[in-house]
Image (cartoon, grey):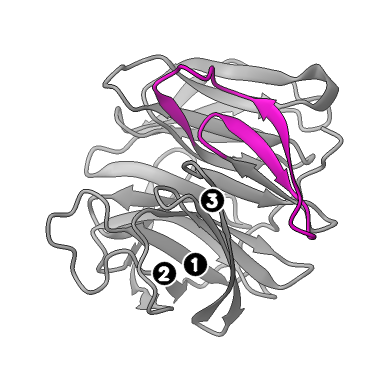
Amino acid sequence: MIITAVPASPEVHALGEGPVWDADRRRLLWVDIVAGAVHEGTLDGGTITPARRHDFGSTVGAVAVAAGGDLIVAERHTLTRLAPDGSRAELARVLPEDRRSRLNDGAVDPAGRFLVGSLAQDGREGEEVLARLDGGAGVTYLDTDLVLSNGLAWTGGRLYSVDTMPGVVWARDYDAATGRTGPREKAFTIDDGLPDGMCADADGNLWIAIWGRGRVECRTTDGELLAVVETGATHTSCPVFAGPELDTLVITSATQDLAEPGPLDGRLFTAKVGVRGLPTPYWNPSF
């Protein structure tokens, strides 16, 4: 099945990423990584209207929201709490200050813990992390040998995580109640394009943005291809299910690394794909 997404907003992002649906406030959040910005907007049908922007002095890899409206923001090396009144506080350092890496994609597990990965900015390979903020216990590192940590999704009691450059989707058992994880194993690989951001639907399937190919692929957790959503933007970066019924797929994209961006590159897109997503868990600041 092939579905065509439609542009949802005229705004263009250098590296649009990490869309999040805040159901209680009916707002959409997303980031522009290289601009160091967190965006808020509204979703009306297939149209996204920007409403607010929060600027940071570094890259911003990901954002998540708490039930009370606070945001957790992955800056270059650290996690920051942004309160509704605009005040900010550093929560934790994930990467050493002198490390030539930055935080990248992140997401909240079913119990409310925030996970985030990293990517190298100096050509190193096999040294990047997938980390979890565990409150009083500090930062727990689930992986320390990745090339480019990216999309995260939970379904069927398992955590699925992307390592972009080798094209691998990893899987492991994940006990949300305790945070305990099982051994990491390869779920499947993607050979045509680079897997980027990811989310899961209510049927237990994965929706994966394919950087460099202008599409989002729906795959089973065994890797079987079920559907493709075409965007027309070369660097499709991340999907999320949004809207009151969680039946609208919102997709970010980027102009980064394109010598001559086309008219759709860097835009936000929406698509009706015939399934509903899982509710986005709220970040629990006690973790």
Q: Amino acid at mark 1?
A: Val
| N-terminal-most mark, 2 or 3 | 3
175, above or below 16, in the image: above
Identified at 30% across, 38% down, the residue is 190
261 on left or right of 275:
left
Identified at 76% across, 45% down, the residue is 283
Residue at which label 2 appears = 268
Q: Amino acid at mark 2?
A: Leu
Q: Amino acid at mark 3?
A: Cys
Disc number placed over residue 250 in the picture, else none:
1
Q: CA distance from mark 2 to mark 3?
A: 16 Å
| N-terminal-most mark, 2 or 1 | 1
Mark closer to the observer (3, 1): 1
| N-terminal-most mark, 3 or 1 | 3
- The answer to whether one can see residue 153 in this image is no
Q: CA distance from mark 3 to mark 1?
A: 11 Å
